[in-house]
Amino acid sequence: MKKNNVMIKIKCECGEEILMVPDLKEMGLAIENHVDLHLQNLKGPAYTPADAEQLRDMLIAQVLKIASQSEDEKDQ
């Protein structure tokens, strides 16, 4: 997705940016791929399945927020 010829991205807590794409299935796959890679980089017993769910929810919330904005809001 573009905003004034700038690609729109969501940002993970790790700093990684994920390009927004208009296809929901592809966007879902991009989020799942990132969650998998993100959690592989976590070391130790601190990781739980709830961590994956929380990360996934945070990324999905960003997608929904951007998708629900009007074109004028996206241009700001």
Image (cartoon, rainbow, N blue to C red):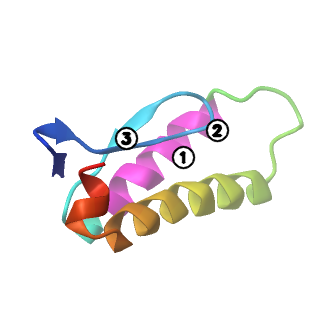
Say which element carries label 3.
strand
- The dot on residue 35 is 1
Say which element carries label 1.
helix
Task: Between label 2 and label 3, give the one nearer the viewer.
Answer: 3
Along the viewing direction, whichever of 17 and 49 lies nearer the viewer = 17
Residue 48: percent from the left, percent from the top?
A: 81, 51
Residue type, numbered disc 3: Ile
Residue 22: percent from the left, percent from the top?
A: 19, 63
Residue type, numbered disc 2: Leu
Task: Between label 3 and label 1, give the one nearer the viewer.
Answer: 3
Q: Is residue 6 above or below residue 24?
A: above
Spatial CA distance of label 3 from label 1 is 11 Å
Say which element carries label 2.
helix
Is residue 31 inside the magenta stretch? yes
Residue type, numbered disc 1: Val
Residue under label 3: 18
Spatial CA distance of label 1 from label 2 is 6 Å
Residue bounds of the magenta highlight: 26-40
Q: Is the residue marked by circle 2 packed among few (<14), some (14-19), or many (20+) residues within 10 Å?
A: some
Residue under label 2: 39
